[in-house]
Amino acid sequence: MQQTVYIPQEENNEELTIDLKKIFFALWHRKNLIIAIFLICILAFASLTFVLSKKYTVTADLYINKTTSSNLIEFNPFALDEVGAAGGGVAALMSGGNNALANEMELIKSPLVIDKVIKENNLVYGKKFGIIPNKREGEYLSAAAFIGKGKNPSFENKKGTNVLTIEYKSKDPELAYNVVNSIINNYIEFYKQLNSDKAKSDQKIIETEYNKAKQALTQKVNTMNGLPEQAMMSTGNLTAMSAFSKPAQRALSTIKGQVISGERSRIDVTEESAKVAHLSSKLEWAKMVDKMSDSSKVLVLKEPQKLRDFEYSSPKLLVNILLGIVFGFIASLLAVIFAENADKKLTYSMLGENIIYNLKNDFSDLKLILLANQDKKVAIVSFENIPDDIQLQLKEYRNVSLINADISNEFVQNVKYADEIVIFASVGKTNSKFYKQIKTMIAEMNKKVVQEVLIK
C-alpha cells in the first residue's frame, strides 16, 4: 500500500537586493553632472552670505528675585504674613515659588510693557511683503503682533535659575539694541510702579486701622472709672468694722465694685494699647517700604550691547557652505535619478540584474554562460556593433547565433527559436526607448534574458 505524504512548500520570500556595482557605475557615469550640481549649490549658498540682508541679534540676561515683595525679608516681621496670604506659606518662601518666572514672563510680555516699547521705537505696520498695501499701514503694532509666536523678540528662562534671557533680531543693529534696552527699562519701571502702588495701598489701609485703634484707645482712657487695685489695701479698718456695722458693709461693697470696674477699664486700655502699638509698628514698615518702592527686584546680569556693522548673526558663510554641501548632495542625487529616467540613451538603471560591465576584461564570464548552455540555442541580440575579435570568438560556439536588434518579423522568428537570450548594448549610445521596446518584445515571447553585456 502506497502512502502519500504532503510536504508544504515554503513560501518564497522576496528579498530586496541592491546592486552596489550598478549604483557605483551609474554615479560614475554621471560624475560631471554630480560635480556641476554640487558646486553650483555650494556657490549659490555661499553667495547668499553676501546677497541676503544681514541680521543682528542683541541679547540680555535678567536676574529676577521673586522670593517676596519685601526687600527686607530677613528682618521684616510681617513678610511671612504676606507670603502666606499669597497661598505659598513658608514653603513658598523657601522655594521662591515654582511659577515665579512664568508669571514674570507674562508680565514682561504684557501690553503694559510692550506698548511702551513699540511707541518708543516707532514700530508700525508696513506694507505686506513690502509691496502689498496694508489698511493699518503707519499704525503702531499691537503687543500681540509684536510678540507674535515668541520667536522675535524671544524670552527664555534658563532652566533651574531665576535668569530670564531676552533676545531680539533685526536688520538694523541700532533698532535691535534699542528694543532690548527699552524692554528692560520699561519692565523695571513697571515693576517699580507696581511696588509703589502696592506700598501706598498697604500704607493707607494700615494707617486707617491705626487711626481707628488710636481713637478707640483715647475714648477708653477718657471713660476709665473705678478705683485701682491698691485701694483695697487701705480698707483694713473698714473691713473690721463691717463685721458689726451695716453702713461699713455697704461702703466696703461699694469700694470692691469700684475696684473691679477699675480693673476692667485697665484691661481694656491695655489691650487697645497693644493693638495700637502693633499697628504702629506695621505702619512704620509700610512707610519704609514706600520709601524704597523706587527700587527693583530686577538685576541686569548681561547688559545689551551695541553691535558694529560686521557683528551680524546671520547669514554666516560657514553655515551657508555647510547647507550648500547638504543640499548639493541631495540635489545631485535627485539630478542623477532624473537623468537616469529621462535620458534618451541607455542608462545603468535600465539594465537588469545579470550584467557584464566590461566585455574585454570579463569575457570569461560570458564564456562560462555559453558553455553552461551549450545544449541550448542562445541568441545574442546586439544593439551596437560587436568588436571583430569578440565576434570571431563567439562564432566558435555552434549553438550561438548573432541577431541585430530590430522591430521586424525576421527578428521575431530568430528569437522565437532561441532558448536563452544575451543582450549586447552600450550605455550612453543605445537608444533607451528602442532598448525598452526590444526587451518588452522578448518578455512577451516568454524568453529569458540570461545576461546583459555592455560594449564600451
Image (cartoon, helix red, strand yellow):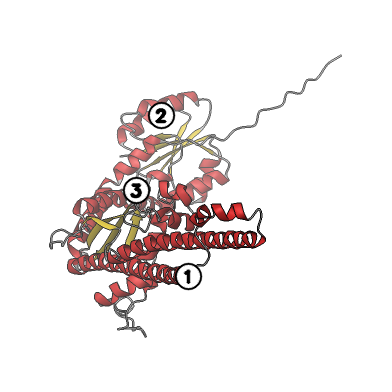
Total marks in image: 3
- Given residues 26 and 103, the one toward you in this image is 103
The percent coordinates of residue 244 (x first, y second) are: 66, 55
Q: Nearer the viewer, mark 2 or mark 1?
A: 1
Q: State the residue position of label 1.
A: 216
Q: Which of 189 and 137 is in front in this view?
A: 189
On screen, residue 116 above or below 341 = below
Give the CA separation, mark 1 to mark 3.
50 Å
Identify the residue position indicated by label 3 in the image. 161
137 versus 237 height, above or below? below
Q: What element carries label 1?
A: helix
Q: Earlier in the sequence, mark 1 or mark 3?
A: 3
Q: Identify the residue at image location x=34%, y=55%.
A: 156
Identify the mark at residue 366; answer none if there is no mark.
2
Residue at the far right: name it. 1
Q: In this view, does 407 lie above or below 204?
A: above
* N-term-proximal mark, 2 vs 1: 1
Q: What residue type is labelled 1?
A: Ala
For the N terminus, give its image quadrant. top right
- Mark 1 residue crowding within 10 angstroms, few (<14) / some (14–19) / many (20+): some
Residue at x 35% of width, y 28% of height: 363
Name the spot of residue 304 as percent of width and height, x first.
Answer: 20, 60
Q: Give the side of residue 317 with respect to residue 79, left or right.
A: left
Binning the other alpha carbons within 10 Å of mark 2 as few (below 14), some (14 to 19) or many (20 upward) gives some
Lower sequence index among marks 2 and 3: 3
- Secondary structure found at label 3: loop
